[in-house]
Image: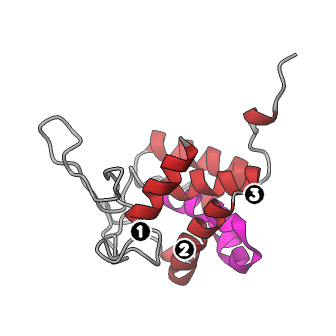
Amino acid sequence: MLQTSYDTLAKSLNSQNGNADNGLVPAWCTSDGAPNPNVWMGKTAPTHYQYDSCRTPFRIGLDFCQNAEQRAQSYVAKTSQFFSNIGAKQMVDGYDLNGNPRPEFSGGQSAAFLGPAAVGAMSSATYSTFLQDGYDSVATLNLLIGGTYYDESWTVISLLMMSGNFLDYTALTPS
Protein backbone atom coordinates (compact mmCIF):
# COMPACT_ATOMS: atom_id res chain seq x y z
CA MET A 1 0.00 0.00 0.00
CA LEU A 2 2.78 2.46 0.89
CA GLN A 3 4.63 1.67 -2.32
CA THR A 4 1.45 2.11 -4.36
CA SER A 5 0.83 5.49 -2.73
CA TYR A 6 4.31 6.75 -3.51
CA ASP A 7 4.15 5.31 -7.04
CA THR A 8 0.86 7.13 -7.71
CA LEU A 9 2.26 10.34 -6.25
CA ALA A 10 5.39 10.10 -8.42
CA LYS A 11 3.36 9.34 -11.55
CA SER A 12 1.10 12.33 -10.95
CA LEU A 13 4.09 14.70 -11.04
CA ASN A 14 5.03 15.00 -14.69
CA SER A 15 5.57 17.42 -17.54
CA GLN A 16 2.18 16.63 -19.07
CA ASN A 17 0.46 17.85 -15.88
CA GLY A 18 2.92 20.77 -15.61
CA ASN A 19 3.71 19.88 -11.99
CA ALA A 20 6.94 17.88 -12.20
CA ASP A 21 8.82 20.43 -10.10
CA ASN A 22 6.18 22.04 -7.85
CA GLY A 23 4.55 18.95 -6.28
CA LEU A 24 0.98 20.18 -6.83
CA VAL A 25 -1.01 16.96 -7.17
CA PRO A 26 -4.41 16.65 -8.85
CA ALA A 27 -7.39 16.54 -6.52
CA TRP A 28 -8.40 13.27 -8.14
CA CYS A 29 -6.19 11.05 -10.30
CA THR A 30 -5.84 7.50 -11.55
CA SER A 31 -3.18 5.16 -10.20
CA ASP A 32 -1.23 6.09 -13.33
CA GLY A 33 -1.16 9.70 -12.14
CA ALA A 34 -3.53 11.10 -14.75
CA PRO A 35 -6.08 13.64 -13.48
CA ASN A 36 -9.43 11.83 -13.22
CA PRO A 37 -12.58 13.96 -13.25
CA ASN A 38 -14.83 10.87 -13.42
CA VAL A 39 -14.73 9.80 -9.79
CA TRP A 40 -18.07 11.19 -8.66
CA MET A 41 -21.13 9.29 -9.82
CA GLY A 42 -22.29 11.26 -12.84
CA LYS A 43 -20.56 14.47 -11.78
CA THR A 44 -17.28 15.98 -12.90
CA ALA A 45 -14.69 16.18 -10.15
CA PRO A 46 -12.13 18.99 -10.04
CA THR A 47 -8.59 17.91 -10.83
CA HIS A 48 -6.60 21.03 -10.00
CA TYR A 49 -4.78 21.48 -6.65
CA GLN A 50 -7.69 22.27 -4.34
CA TYR A 51 -9.34 21.21 -1.09
CA ASP A 52 -9.12 17.48 -1.86
CA SER A 53 -5.40 17.62 -2.64
CA CYS A 54 -4.05 20.40 -0.39
CA ARG A 55 -3.74 17.88 2.47
CA THR A 56 -1.04 15.92 0.63
CA PRO A 57 1.97 17.90 1.98
CA PHE A 58 0.70 17.25 5.52
CA ARG A 59 0.35 13.50 5.03
CA ILE A 60 3.65 13.12 3.23
CA GLY A 61 5.39 15.54 5.62
CA LEU A 62 4.08 13.45 8.50
CA ASP A 63 5.64 10.36 6.93
CA PHE A 64 8.98 12.12 6.77
CA CYS A 65 8.80 13.49 10.32
CA GLN A 66 7.73 10.21 11.90
CA ASN A 67 9.51 7.69 9.68
CA ALA A 68 12.37 9.61 8.00
CA GLU A 69 10.97 8.36 4.68
CA GLN A 70 13.25 9.68 1.94
CA ARG A 71 10.53 9.56 -0.73
CA ALA A 72 8.52 11.85 1.52
CA GLN A 73 11.38 14.30 1.86
CA SER A 74 11.85 14.36 -1.92
CA TYR A 75 8.17 15.12 -2.46
CA VAL A 76 7.76 17.84 0.19
CA ALA A 77 10.96 19.51 -1.04
CA LYS A 78 8.99 20.31 -4.20
CA THR A 79 5.92 21.71 -2.45
CA SER A 80 8.03 23.52 0.14
CA GLN A 81 10.14 25.23 -2.51
CA PHE A 82 7.03 26.21 -4.46
CA PHE A 83 5.12 27.59 -1.47
CA SER A 84 8.13 29.26 0.16
CA ASN A 85 8.71 31.15 -3.10
CA ILE A 86 5.12 32.40 -2.89
CA GLY A 87 5.27 33.17 0.83
CA ALA A 88 2.90 32.12 3.58
CA LYS A 89 0.85 35.31 3.53
CA GLN A 90 0.39 35.23 -0.26
CA MET A 91 -0.83 31.63 -0.59
CA VAL A 92 -4.31 31.13 -2.01
CA ASP A 93 -6.75 28.25 -1.72
CA GLY A 94 -6.32 26.72 -5.15
CA TYR A 95 -3.79 26.35 -7.95
CA ASP A 96 -3.67 24.91 -11.42
CA LEU A 97 -1.24 22.00 -11.48
CA ASN A 98 1.30 24.24 -13.23
CA GLY A 99 1.27 26.60 -10.23
CA ASN A 100 -0.97 29.37 -11.52
CA PRO A 101 -3.14 30.70 -8.68
CA ARG A 102 -6.75 29.62 -8.88
CA PRO A 103 -8.37 30.68 -5.61
CA GLU A 104 -11.66 29.01 -4.82
CA PHE A 105 -12.68 31.95 -2.64
CA SER A 106 -11.41 35.51 -2.35
CA GLY A 107 -10.84 37.75 0.60
CA GLY A 108 -8.88 35.53 2.94
CA GLN A 109 -6.78 32.43 3.43
CA SER A 110 -7.47 28.82 4.28
CA ALA A 111 -5.71 26.92 7.06
CA ALA A 112 -6.35 23.77 5.00
CA PHE A 113 -3.82 25.03 2.44
CA LEU A 114 -1.28 26.87 4.57
CA GLY A 115 -1.14 24.46 7.53
CA PRO A 116 -0.34 21.32 5.51
CA ALA A 117 2.13 23.23 3.31
CA ALA A 118 3.95 24.44 6.43
CA VAL A 119 4.01 20.91 7.88
CA GLY A 120 5.65 19.74 4.65
CA ALA A 121 8.28 22.44 5.18
CA MET A 122 9.30 20.72 8.43
CA SER A 123 11.44 18.42 6.27
CA SER A 124 14.36 20.83 5.93
CA ALA A 125 15.83 23.84 7.70
CA THR A 126 15.96 25.44 4.25
CA TYR A 127 12.29 26.26 4.67
CA SER A 128 12.42 27.48 8.27
CA THR A 129 11.23 31.00 7.40
CA PHE A 130 8.20 29.65 5.53
CA LEU A 131 7.53 27.19 8.37
CA GLN A 132 7.62 29.97 10.99
CA ASP A 133 5.50 32.33 8.88
CA GLY A 134 3.04 29.49 8.25
CA TYR A 135 2.85 28.63 11.94
CA ASP A 136 2.36 32.29 12.91
CA SER A 137 -0.43 32.72 10.35
CA VAL A 138 -2.25 29.49 11.24
CA ALA A 139 -1.89 30.27 14.97
CA THR A 140 -3.99 33.44 14.51
CA LEU A 141 -6.96 31.03 14.24
CA ASN A 142 -8.39 33.28 11.52
CA LEU A 143 -7.67 31.38 8.28
CA LEU A 144 -11.24 30.24 7.78
CA ILE A 145 -12.13 31.10 4.18
CA GLY A 146 -12.67 27.43 3.31
CA GLY A 147 -15.30 26.98 5.98
CA THR A 148 -15.20 27.10 9.75
CA TYR A 149 -15.34 23.36 10.47
CA TYR A 150 -12.83 22.31 7.81
CA ASP A 151 -10.34 25.11 8.36
CA GLU A 152 -10.58 24.91 12.16
CA SER A 153 -9.88 21.18 11.93
CA TRP A 154 -6.78 21.79 9.80
CA THR A 155 -5.74 24.60 12.14
CA VAL A 156 -5.67 22.20 15.10
CA ILE A 157 -4.06 19.30 13.25
CA SER A 158 -1.40 21.50 11.65
CA LEU A 159 -0.56 23.35 14.87
CA LEU A 160 -0.26 20.05 16.75
CA MET A 161 2.21 18.80 14.17
CA MET A 162 4.22 22.03 13.85
CA SER A 163 4.47 22.38 17.64
CA GLY A 164 5.64 18.79 18.14
CA ASN A 165 2.44 17.76 19.93
CA PHE A 166 0.94 15.52 17.25
CA LEU A 167 0.58 12.04 18.69
CA ASP A 168 2.13 9.20 16.71
CA TYR A 169 -0.35 6.41 17.33
CA THR A 170 1.85 3.91 15.51
CA ALA A 171 4.48 4.34 18.22
CA LEU A 172 2.10 3.30 21.01
CA THR A 173 2.25 -0.24 22.25
CA PRO A 174 -0.86 -1.93 23.61
CA SER A 175 -0.84 -2.43 27.37
Residue wearing tag 1:
13
Say which residue appears at 59% left-offset and 55% top-offset.
60
* Residue type pointed to by label 2: Lys
Q: How is the image coloured?
A: secondary structure
Which numbered marker is on residue 68?
3
Local SS, label 3? loop
Where is residue 7 drawn, in percent x and y? 48, 56
Which numbered marker is on residue 101?
none
* Residue 6 on the magenta segment: no
Vertically, is 99 above or below 111? below
Give residue 145's quadrant in the image: bottom left
Q: Is residue 60 left or right of residue 30?
A: right
Where is residue 66 drawn, in percent x and y? 75, 50
Q: Is residue 118 left or right of residue 37?
A: right
Say which residue appears at 36% left-offset and 62% top-offset.
49
Can see residue 22? yes
Give residue 85's quadrant in the image: bottom right
* Residue 121 on the magenta segment: yes
Mark 1 or mark 2, earlier in chain: 1
* Residue reaching furthest to the left: 42
